[in-house]
Amino acid sequence: MTYQYDNTEKQRLDSYLAEKIPDMSRSHITGLVKEGKITVNGKMQKAGYQLVPGDEIFVPEDKPAEVDIRPEDIPLDIVYEDNDIIIINKPKDMVVHPAAGHYENTLVNALMYHCKDSLSGINGELRPGIVHRIDKDTTGLLVACKNDRAHNHVAGQLADHSITRRYVALVNGVIKEEEGTIDKNIDRSRSDRKKMAITDPASGRRAVTHYRVLERFPEHTLVECRLETGRTHQIRVHMASIGHPLAGDEVYGVKKDRLSGNGQYLHAKVLGLIHPATGEYMEFSSELPEYFQNTLEKLRKSAK
């Protein structure tokens, strides 16, 4: 489908399309722009491109791939649930949504079984209900939505950074300062497309992580990280960029440190949002998983 921009004032490409196509999430639009599937006057542009009168924007018909995503009776640790949202405490080793070659045993499969047909459809058949995600080896809280109205409301909070997200991470090395802020752009690595990387200020997307020290050990530091933005692998990339990669993270940190084997030590502990129906602020918290607590106890004993 082709849209002709006829506004008198300039407007970002992604925000314009988000208004014109309300059934398509802004993150999905951004993805199509990056892939070059959305063009302006026949040319690839960035999501932040400033449209001018007369620009013609081509958007391909959004047909999801035909795949068979089946509901699966997988136990869920449900922290909260109503007719609009469901808050899940995700365990380690669970992938959030299906992807090519991996269509089973995901959180989406479990949600489809539990919620039946009550999941938002904005992000397509591969991600019903999914507004944001956390990595396979990251544990903790995330919210899924049961209808498109709730999805749009929560996605809007993510976009304007008003959702509270606090993580607990165990990092390598001893951080001397009590707290700090990492403000560095992140984008897909040019050398390895499976990884993210710090970019110069003129490229990538701005990413901001605030951290504070919770506890120090001889070779590690336990920190709380508060996300101001939510980029892929943000905490992992940011902490590695200041010389303190997450313990167990063999992608961005030490290939084999003495705590490897459990994946990165990262837990989404606190999640707060405005309820899409009531307008009330709600905040949820979850305890560190057992393996994480056991590791901390060992570090405390060895430090004595």
Image: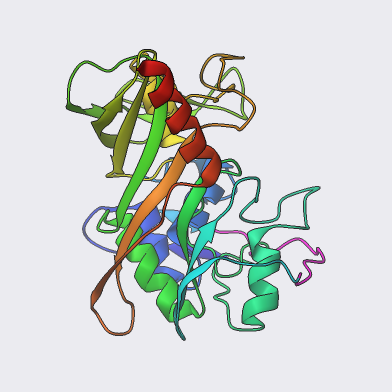
Q: Where is residue 200 in the image (x, y as percent from the top left)?
A: 34, 20
Which image quarter is the C terminus in? Answer: top left
Q: Can residue 246 be seen in this view?
A: no
Q: Magenta stretch? A: 58-72
Q: Is residue 292 visible?
A: yes
Which image quarter is the N terminus in? Answer: bottom right
Q: Position of residue 56 (x, y in %)?
A: 46, 56
The chief SS type of the magenta part is loop
Asked whether 198 or 246 is in front, the reply is 246
Asked whether 164 or 76 is in front, the reply is 76
Q: Where is residue 145 in the image (x, y as percent from the top left)?
A: 49, 73
Q: In this view, does 257 lie above or below 126?
A: above
Asked whether 278 or 199 is in front, the reply is 278
Q: Quadrant of residue 107?
A: bottom right
Asked whether 270 or 22 is in front, the reply is 270
Q: In which quarter of the image is residue 240?
A: top left
Q: Which colour scheme appears in the figure?
A: rainbow
> In the image, is 203 to the left or to the right of 250?
left
